Image (tube, rainbow, N blue to C red):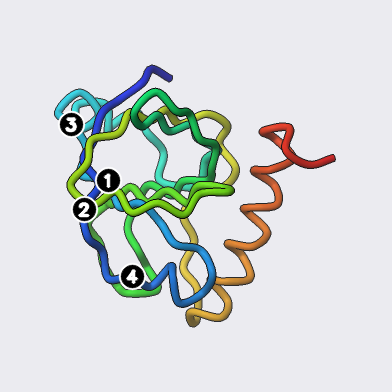
Amino acid sequence: MKRFKGTVIHGDKTGRTIGFPTLNINTDSNFQKRLIDIIHGVYTCQVWHKENMYLGVAHYGPRLVQNEQIPLLEIHLFNFNQVLYDEEVDFKLLDFIRPTMKFENLEAAKKQIQNDAETAKVLLGLKN
């Protein structure tokens, strides 16, 4: 998949409360045109910001725990602690990990996100 651009926007900060802060991305029109081709789910990803490339795990789709139906792109970057609100980033979705799932509660979602992050690290070569 090609690189896309987006602007980091404020979210509801739920990811922070469970140990997985995310960049919420307001995507550009090129990405939005490709939405029909992009399966809702979890992916490994790369993000570029000011000459630096970061690796992470992304979810694109509705946030079902919060009963939200509008698709959102959220990216958790490994070894990253910067604040990028209102800044533009480039991103690329890489390996598909799993489709979007509905969870009974935030704790169940947290457990799955932990598993997804571990899977992403293995796929990205960050962990054996």
Check contact, mark 1 vs mark 4: CB within 8 A.
Answer: no
Q: Is residue 5 left or right of residue 77?
A: left
Look at label 2 and name its amino acid: Ile
Query: Mark 3 to mark 1: distance in Å?
Result: 9 Å
Q: Nearer the viewer, residue 93 or 56?
A: 56
Q: Quadrant of residue 27?
A: top left
Look at label 3 and name its amino acid: Asp
Q: Residue furthest right?
A: 128
Q: Secondary structure at mark 3?
A: loop
Q: Nearer the viewer, residue 55 or 72?
A: 55
Check contact, mark 1 vs mark 2: CB within 8 A.
Answer: yes
Q: Nearer the viewer, residue 18 or 34?
A: 18
Residue 10 against residue 40 in the figure, above or below: below
Badge 1: few (under 14), some or many (20 or more) residues near its Cα, within 10 Å? many
Query: Mark 2 to mark 3: distance in Å?
Result: 13 Å
Check contact, mark 2 vs mark 3: CB within 8 A.
Answer: no
Residue 35 against residue 116 in the figure, above or below: above
What is the number of the mark on residue 25? 1
Picture coordinates of residue 54, whole percent (x, y): 50, 35
**Which residue is labeled 4 in the image?**
13
Residue 56 against residue 32 in the figure, above or below: below
Look at label 1 and name its amino acid: Ile
Q: Secondary structure at mark 1?
A: strand
**Which residue is labeled 3 in the image?**
28
Q: Is residue 3 left or right of residue 101?
A: left
